[in-house]
């Protein structure tokens, strides 16, 4: 880009261009803030410019970890009564499983033809009862 001719001439009648003044940079608050940022950068203290979503997610994660820790502590501090109740509950569950297992085993021991014959007998009696009620 070619420089204008009026810069070379030392004509006192011409107005020489000057750099415009930035009112923000001149303000005292801006200068103090800039100085503080430079000092923090030298010390290694960068400002926390995290997005709000990231802050919320970190807070939730911290809360979740704290909640898990509390639950673990509560489980460790079970009283004698709670331990005894858990033992009884487990015994009852085992008894129920044994009963259902016995029922299944008893059904397996039953001959297939006998069970099918009984079902047929029940159907016949059901039909006969329906015929008697209809008439």
Image (cartoon, helix red, strand yellow):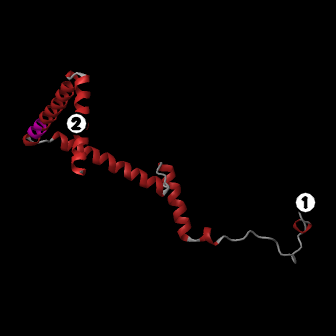
Residue closest to the far front: 135
Q: CA distance from mark 1 to mark 2?
A: 113 Å
Q: Which residue is mark 2?
A: 122
Please indicate, yes or no, whether residue 70 appears anywhere in the rendered image.
no
The residue positioned 58% from the left and 71% from the top of the image is 27
Please indicate, yes or no, whether residue 54 appears anywhere in the rendered image.
yes
Labelled pair 1, 2 in contact (Cβ < 8 Å): no
In the image shown, does 110 or 98 lie closer to the viewer? 110
> Disc number at residue 2?
1
Magenta stretch secondary structure, dominant: helix
For the residue carrying disc 1, how many other residues have a C-alpha within 10 Å: few (<14), some (14-19), or many (20+)?
A: few
| Residue 38, percent from left and from top | 53, 55
Query: How many numbered circles does the render carry?
Result: 2
**Residue range of the region highlighted in magenta in the rendering:** 83-88
N-terminal-most mark, 1 or 2: 1
In this rendering, is residue 18 above or below 48?
below
| Residue 3, percent from left and from top | 89, 62
| Residue 116, percent from left and from top | 26, 28
The residue positioned 13% from the left and 38% from the top of the image is 89
Horizontal relation, residue 66 to residue 74: left or right = right
In this rendering, is residue 91 above or below 71?
above
The quarter of the picture where the N terminus appears is bottom right
In the image shown, does 120 or 14 lie closer to the viewer? 120
| Residue 33, percent from left and from top | 52, 63
Q: Secondary structure at mark 2?
A: helix
The residue positioned 52% from the left and 57% from the top of the image is 37
Magenta span contains residue 135: no
Horizontal relation, residue 110 to residue 19: left or right = left
The residue positioned 22% from the left and 21% from the top of the image is 111
> Disc number at residue 89?
none
């Amino acid at each position: 880009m070619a420089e204008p001719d009026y810069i070379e001439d030392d004509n006192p009648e011409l107005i020489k261009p000057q750099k415009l003044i930035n009112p923000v940079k001149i303000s005292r608050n801006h200068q103090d803030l800039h100085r503080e940022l430079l000092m923090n950068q030298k010390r290694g203290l960068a400002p926390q410019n995290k997005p709000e979503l990231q802050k919320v997610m970190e807070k939730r994660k911290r809360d979740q970890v704290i909640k898990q820790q509390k639950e673990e502590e509560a489980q460790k501090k079970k009283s004698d009564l709670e331990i005894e109740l858990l033992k009884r509950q487990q015994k009852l569950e085992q008894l129920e499983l044994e009963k259902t297992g016995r029922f299944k085993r008893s059904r397996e021991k039953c001959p297939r033809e006998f069970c099918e014959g009984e079902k047929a007998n029940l159907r016949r009696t059901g039909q006969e009862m329906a015929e008697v009620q209809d008439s």
